[in-house]
Image: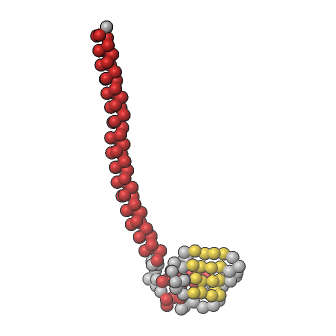
Amino acid sequence: MQKHHGHFTNLKFFSFLFLLTLLVTPVFAQDDEIKRLQQKIAELELKVKKLEILLNESILIPKSDTLGWYNKKNWRKLAIGMTQTQVNEILGEPIKIIQGKKILWYYPNIYGGIVTFNDKGYLVNWNEP
């Protein structure tokens, strides 16, 4: 009878060890996975930051030789009655257009940069940046 009891105790002990191994192994695997994911997140955040810098630089400075809206001399070429095409050729594409009774073109500058057209598409007003 004692022999059976010892065998049963050994079986309980080995079952306990087996279950403990099953529980502990995923914890170590999860730690490694968490560290790997944290490193990946840090790499992606750095890439996003670099892309945001590139995007801001590309939005703020036009690619044309005349520098479009960025050049104050171009704003001073505007004249009441110009068409949208004429203004576009001088200032370049706006970053935002709002259509209503009047048409507003916005250029990316914290100090302004708004062009206003009437409902027929002719320039009626503007604010230089």
Residue 129 visible in this rendered orientation of the protein: yes
Residue 23 x, y percent position in the rendering: 36, 34
Tally of marks: 0
Which residue is at the far front? 2
Could you say where residue 121 lies in the image, as x and y percent from the top left? 66, 82
In the figure, 44 relative to 97: above or below?
above
Measuring from the top left, give residue 63's x and y in whole percent: 45, 77
Q: Which of 102 and 20 is in front in this view?
A: 20
Residue placed furthest toward the top: 1
x 36%, y 43%: residue? 30
Which residue is painted at 34% across and 54% down in the image?
Answer: 39
> Which quarter of the rendering shows the N terminus?
top left
Name the colour scheme: secondary structure
Picture quadrant where residue 21 is located: top left
Asked if residue 18 lies left or right of residue 63, the reply is left
> Residue visible at 34% across and 45% down?
31
Q: Nearer the viewer, residue 32 or 104?
A: 32
Q: Is residue 89 visible?
A: no
